[in-house]
Structures are given as C-alpha cells and as structure tokens.
Image (cartoon, rainbow, N blue to C red):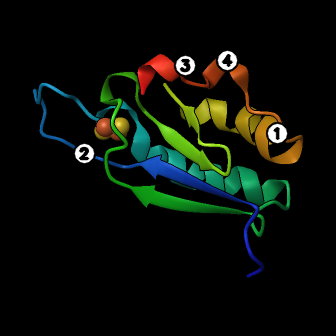
Amino acid sequence: MAKPEYYVFVCSQQRPQGHPRGSCGERGAAGLIPRLSQSLMARNMHQKVSIVPTACLGPCSVGANMLVFPGEVLYKGVMADDLDSIVDSHFVNGQPLAAKVAPDAVW
Ligand code: FES
C-alpha cells in the first residue's frame, strides 16, 4: 500500500448504557467503518485514505466522531448516510464538508 494521503480516526468507543458521557458506539459508530470503506472503494480512494478505529476522541456528546489528518478536521454527528458526501468533499475534492465539521469550541 502506498503512503496514505489521509488518516481517518473513527471513534469506536462503546460505553455501558446509561454512562454519563455516552459514546459514539451508542450513536451508530459501529456501522461507520464498513460504510466508509465501501465509499472509498467505490471511488478508488481506498489506497489514499487509511481508516483507523480508535477509542474516545474527547467530545462524546456530539458523536459519532471522526478525526481526519492532515488538517485536524473533526467531523461530528456522523451517520452512515453522511459518509459519501464527506468522502466526495474531503478526499476527492480536498474540501472538508463544512456542515459536519465540529467548531473549535467543541474540542
Ligand atoms: S466516545 Fe467517541 S468521542 Fe468520546
């Protein structure tokens, strides 16, 4: 595999039901990685973007969250149906999808 252009850290943290911080896991994070992989493959971008499952990124209350490097772009409230748009905007066209980017105040 060639050196990736992007790394996407996908929060896969799961906490027990009723935990005060909640988790991305209870907001559908488990479905994000296979869907993201599928979206990248459909655009022949899977060699350029490395998907990294990770534990808590911090701002649990706005999850599910994904953090993209380079650029330190945090996507919040990500749902599976957002991923095609994120891939097209950020990885194909080089522009973060503003509607899903967390403001600096979040983290
Ligand atoms: S559980 Fe995902 S950011 Fe904390």
Residue corresponding to mark 3: 103
Which callout, 3 or 1, points to the residue nearer the camera?
3
Q: Looking at the image, is mark 4 or mark 2 nearer the viewer?
A: 4
Give the CA separation, mark 4 to mark 1.
13 Å
Disc 2 is placed on an element classified as loop
Q: Is residue 62 above or below residue 92?
A: above
- Residue 24 visible in this rendered orientation of the protein: no
Within 10 Å of disc 4 (Cα), the crowding (few <14, some 14-19, many 20+) is few
Residue placed at 51% from the left, 52% from the top?
9
Q: Is mark 4 within 8 Å of ligand 1?
A: no
Q: Secondary structure at mark 3?
A: loop
Q: Which mark, residue 14?
A: 2
How far apart marks 3 and 2 lie (CA) works out to 24 Å
Residue 88 image label: 1
Q: Is residue 21 above or below residue 35?
A: above
Name above or below for residue 107 compared with residue 68: above
Please, what is the three-letter code of the amino acid marked with disc 3? Pro
Q: Looking at the picture, how far across and down is residue 4, in whole percent?
A: 73, 68
Distance, label 4 to label 2, CA atoms, is 25 Å
Q: CA distance from mark 3 to mark 1?
A: 21 Å
